[in-house]
Amino acid sequence: MKDLDTSANLGKFQDRAVTAKGEARATVALTNPQTLWFNTGTLCNIECVNCYIESSPTNDKLVYITADEVQDYLNQIKARKWPVTEIAFTGGEPFMNPQMIEIMRRSLDVGYDVLVLTNAMRPMMRKTMQAGILELNAAYPGKLTFRISVDHYRADLHDAERGAGALEKTIIGMAWLRDNGVRMAVAGRSVFGDSDEDSRAGYAAFYAEHGFDIDAQDPGMTVLFPEMDETVEVPEITTACWGILDKSPDAVMCASSRMVVKRKGAATPAVLACTLLPYSPEFELGASLEEAEKDVALNHPHCAKFCVLGGASCSA
């Protein structure tokens, strides 16, 4: 893990129940579980400058999850009667996982929509992966979406994060998906300082240039994530904030989703409260979905900046 200067929030986010000022900390109940996320493993074919999970060709802190382990949680969804509609996969790069096609197949086979976050680069473009993607897209029409990481529509800015030539390689993958009728969305970032309006106009031009059928104005299809910088001062979210902000806790991501990870050396996977905090022990809720039904205390800067104040969500 990288050493971060967290002095901006010194004294904050220390106690699950109360803030630094002694006020009651806000919590969020799992009221409507719609998405179950799986981290397929932290290994990635590239290493990005600001990757929140520090994925790289050598980071295996979260190891490859298996199709049988995913199947167990799919069974638990039914047993717990969770109203899940979407199974989503993130990494690392999901297509580094050798069982990714079978994992997707099992999720689609029981009727869920499947969302895969990918950089659309070489791992996805291997022949075995291409063949599997085409088979699944044909067998389960309208059920599969790939959300492609395009940090910025300008190659110089995207490549500054992901390495020289990265956007060009991603465009090749996106063109293959386009030509084979696979539905795409895009994940961009706000680190570059563009306004939302300017960003969406830029993505719209990028899509038009390459013939990508992606709606730049739909926040579910072009997702612009606020930055997750733990060195920036953010307020702690108290129970009073819901009324002050005129926001319902049901709108926060942990009210509708959980994420499953497999830690290196662990005997079994674990269920986390949030996709954004894979290395924070207090956000690990247990090994089962039943254990993961407990309330989540918003005891991290990301809870405030990304979810409550930023209004972002990782789901479609």
Image (tube, grey):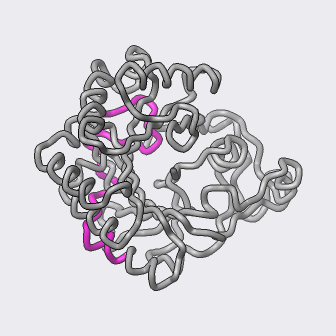
Image: magenta residue range: 46-72
Total numbered labels: 0
Is 257 left or right of 241, judged from the image as shown? left
- Above or below, 266 relative to 279: below
Q: Is residue 55 magenta?
A: yes
Q: Is residue 158 visible?
A: yes
The residue sitting at 41% across, 30% down in the picture is: 150
Picture residue at 56% right of the left edge, 21% below the top: 201
Q: Looking at the image, which is closer to me, 35 or 289? A: 35
The answer to whether 260 is drawn above or below residue 146 in the figure is: below
Assign the N terminus to one quadrant of the image.
top left
Residue lying at the far top of the rendered structure: 156
Nearest the viewer among 129 and 123 is 129
x then y, percent, for residue 162 = 36, 27
Question: What residue is rendered at 48% in x and 66% in y?
Answer: 85
Which corner quadrant of the image does residue 156 belong to? Answer: top left
> What type of secondary structure mainly makes up the magenta span?
loop
Residue 100 in sight in this render: no
Quarter-wise, where is residue 105 in the image? bottom left
Residue 94 in the figure: left or right of residue 130: right
Q: Is residue 297 magenta?
A: no
Residue 227 at x, y percent in the picture: 58, 34
Give the x, y percent position of residue 36: 47, 64
Horizontal side of residue 204 vs 105, given as left or right? right
Q: Residue at x 34, y 42 (%)?
A: 118
Residue lying farthest to the left in this orientation: 127
> Residue 46, relative to residue 250: is it above or below?
above
Where 108 sits versus 177, above or below? below
